[in-house]
Each structure stands twice: as structure tokens, then as C-alpha cells.
Amino acid sequence: MVGQRVRTRFAPSPTGYLHVGGLRTALYNYLFAKKLHGEFIIRIEDTDQSRKVEDAQKNLIKTLEWAGIVADESPEKGGNYGPYVQSERLDIYDKYCKQLLSDQHAYYCFSTHEELEENRQLQIKQGLQPKYNRKWLPEEMGGTIPAGLIKKKLDEGEPYVIRMKVPDYVSVWFEDIIRGPVEFDSATIDDQVLMKSDGFPTYHFASVIDDHFMEFTHIIRGEEWLSSMPKHLLLYEFFGWEAPKVAHLPLLLNPDRSKLSKRQGDVAVEDYIRKGYSADAIVNFVAMLGWNEGEGSEQEVYSMEQLIEKFSLERVGKAGAVFNIDKLNWLEKQYIKNRPTEKLVEVIKPILKAELEQKKSLMPLEMITSEAYLEKVIALMRERVGFEHEFVTFSSYFYFEPETYDGEAIKKRWSVDTNDLLREFVELLESLDEFSADNIETQLKEFVAPKGLKAAALIHPLRVVTSGVSFGPSLYHMLEVLGKETVLRRIQAGIEKITFPV
């Protein structure tokens, strides 16, 4: 492995959505490989055919690419180490399983599910760690079963699995890049199943075979696989192969520090995509779930290029990382504030088009769909929206007439004279040659002053009749963007629909 080009992998099972923990694992593998000018590979582990979900493989890769994590080799892209789907590599596993049987590192097991469960419950009752009791370990491997009985069972077509024989009285030690030295006593390691009765390998067996032949230099995965490491290392030893370096990532936790689960919120990346989170914010957020740049750095917003430059496994902590949705929301806002206007326009246009297919606008379509108009909306709303789609959904009054009016605002802001004030002010607005924010503000203040009123007496009603809501950007700039014709039309409509007292 010395001098070998760095190769890392993400190896999901096609069982459904991409978990945010899976995204983090993929991201860390990607960042590590790219920083060291290596290769990142996607392999699909589908040996559990009962859990396979239609189109899951395609959706997993699509979601990763949405996040900017593009593999150098994958089932779709191909490469020199394929196939990259485990169900297409069964002949390889069969070959090396036969080698383990021949070398007496594995044996046939004919125990039924009922026998295994009975033995498991008995060990639990005795306060022991549940392990296979080696009932079918052959005589030549230190067991009690004669070779003839095993041959007879095989000839009769009796269902079986193939188990690895864990050596007795040995210690399995390895150096974890994140956790340091880790040691396991073989007495705690079960004789794991290598090949299932359906002819498919288990995860433990297939992943070791594939990791070796695909020449991965580093295995970066979740903490939940830490206890599997000694089983994998024993297989490397049996085959005489050099094991890759390993790093086990900390768990993702809910705010109450329980393991992240759907019971307390969304865990699928697709859920966050549907809600409108951007790839930039998601990737930035997930990168910091366990990793930090180090002391002295106050940076919190990173581009993918910066993450590649600064990432290191040595800066990944051992402790569980809390999934703080408030931090994700904050990051999303930072990206919106700093994203180039032209990129936001690109995002807004298709969202607005979809809305216009559902709702009719009284405003000129060529105006509200123009880049110039959308740039004005962005300038006013950039600090107020939490998601890119809210430039349309949260700001609908820039494109559509108000369908309702804020009842609480009307109760609070309207008086018996409000509609009359609005009618009178409409006449003033109609006479304006320059319909600009500054001019509207000047005219409004000059209009209310002789009446002994404060500007607020007209500002709040104007906002409600023109937008339908009681909050938003600068009223004067909003009116300027909407334009004279739209503003006059909406004020007239509001006067007709809003009566006092409410």
C-alpha cells in the first residue's frame, strides 16, 4: 500500500433513501480522496436481496451527485475494478469461500433458525454474550462433527450456511485513524456467517473481498461498524492480504443525544431537498457533524473546494455529533445572502413558472418573469427568506394579487377614516410622474402631516392592501417594484373588500 494512490469508497445498500449519516460518510470519503488527489468510488452492496428497493441505486447516486459528490467509478460510470454491484460478483465470493473451507478457516453449518434462537435465549438467560455454539464444527477443526455426516447432509441437499472459524485465545488489534488503538479478544467474536443459505455472501465477507480487489487504501465508515472490524481483519489475515487503513466516524445524535432517528425529525437527504435546502448548505452542515478545522479558525461557511483543501480525518472527533436543525437553517440563510443574484434568478424562474401554471397573474408576464424584475425582488427579499423557493412562495405578492388580507392587522391598524385616506392618497399617486421609493415616501409624509397623522397611519394599511400581509421589506421600495399600475389596482381592490369595523 506504500506509495499507492489513495482510493476510498461509499458502499450503500439499495434499500431506500439516502440517510444524512450516509451522506456524511460519502462526503468524508470524497473529501479525503480529493484532498490527496485520489479516487472516490461508489459500490452497491445488494447481497440482502430481501431488502432491495426498486430504483434505490439510481436515486442514491442521483442524490450524491446533487450534493456535488461525483464518483470516479460507479455502477453507472464503470471503471477498471467492476462490477460495482455485489450481486454481479457472486462467482468471486464463491471462489474465496471455497478457499477458506479448504484452509479450514470456515465450515458448513446446518443449524436451523429455531435451534439458533433457542441457543441465543439460553445464553442470554445465563448472562453470556450470544454466540454460535459451534454445534457443526467438524472434528478436523477441533469440533465433534465427523466429516461423513457433513458430506451426507450436503448430498441430501440440506440447507446450510458457511461460517468463519474464529481462532481461540487471540487478540485482534488495529489502529483507527480517529480512535487510536483498538483491541478485541477473540472470545468476544462470533463465528460469523460468510455465505447465506441463498448463496449470497454476508456484508462482512463480500466487503472484505471487494475492498481488497478494488484496492481501497482507506475505509471510512460509521461507528456502528467498529465491532465488525476484528472479523474483517481475521479474513484479511486468512487470505494473507494487507488490510486498508480504517477510520470510524462518530454517531449522529438528536438534540437529546439519542441516536438520530426519524422519530425526532427527518433523516433522509431527500426530505431536506424537498423542503428547499440547497446542496451548498446541506454539504457544509453535514461536513461539520464531527469535523472542525481546528483551534483559531472561526470560519463556518465553506465551499466544497474549501472543504477539500482543509479536511483531515485527524480533525474528526470521537464524540457523537448533534444534528442541530437551527444551525442548518442559519447556514442556508448565509448562502442565500451571499449567492450571486444571477444564480438565484436561475433557481427562481422555474419555480415561478410552475406557480404561474397554477395561478393567474394580473401583472404583465413579460415583466414579472424578466431577469430585471426578479433581481429587484431578490434585492428586497434576500435578507428575509430562509429558502430559495421563498423568493416566490413567501413573496407571492410580487407576482399575484392578494387573495386574503391579514385580519389581525386590519383590526389593529384600520379606523373609520382609513379607507377614505386610501382613496385620497390614490388620487395623489395617480398624479405622480416619478413612481420611485423616495418620491412615494416624500409624498406620503407630506400627505399625512397636515392631517395631524403619523406616517404609520397610512404605511400599514398600504402594505396590507397591496400585499395582503402586515410584514415585508421597505414599503416604499416594494411599491416601486410593483409599479404604479399594480399598486393603484390593488389599493382600489382593497378598499372595496375591506370594511370597518371588521
Image (spheres, grey):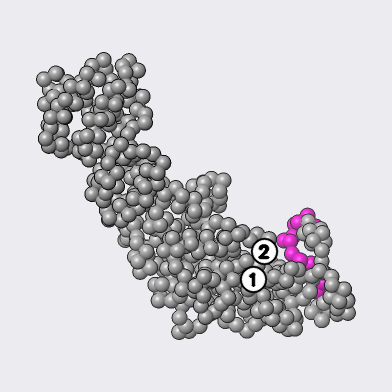
Q: Amino acid at mark 2?
A: Gln
> Residue 76, how many percent across, how many down?
52, 70
Q: In the rendered structure, does residue 26 fall within the stretch colored magenta? A: no
149 and 90: which is toward the camera? 90
> Residue 138, how many percent across, how many down?
82, 77
Q: Secondary structure at mark 1?
A: helix
> Residue 106, how many percent across, how many down?
74, 77
In the visual, does 145 lie left or right of 334? Answer: right
130 versus 331 height, above or below: below
Q: Amino acid at mark 1?
A: Ser
At x 30% / y 33%, what residue is drawn? 467
What span is in magenta? 122-137
379 versus 281 height, above or below: above
Quadrant showing the C terminus:
top left
In the visual, does 142 lie left or right of 459? Answer: right
At x 34% / y 50%, what residue is drawn? 349
Asked whether disc 2 touches disc 1, contact meaning CB atoms under 8 Å apart, the reply is yes
Query: Main SS type for the magenta part?
Result: loop
Q: Secondary structure at mark 2?
A: helix
Alpha carbon of mark 2 to alpha carbon of mark 1: how far?
9 Å
Q: In the rendered structure, does residue 133 fall within the stretch colored magenta? A: yes
In the visual, does 483 lie left or right of 199? Answer: left
Please name the residue that numbered disc 2 is placed on.
49
Would you say residue 410 is visible in this rendering? yes
Please name the residue that numbered disc 1 is placed on.
87
Mark 2 surroundings within 10 Å by alpha-carbon count, few (fewer than 14), some (14 through 19), many (20 or more): some
450 and 150: which is toward the camera? 450
In the visual, does 489 lie left or right of 169? Answer: left
* Residue 39 placement: quadrant: bottom left
At x 56% / y 50%, what residue is drawn? 261
* Residue 479 placement: quadrant: top left
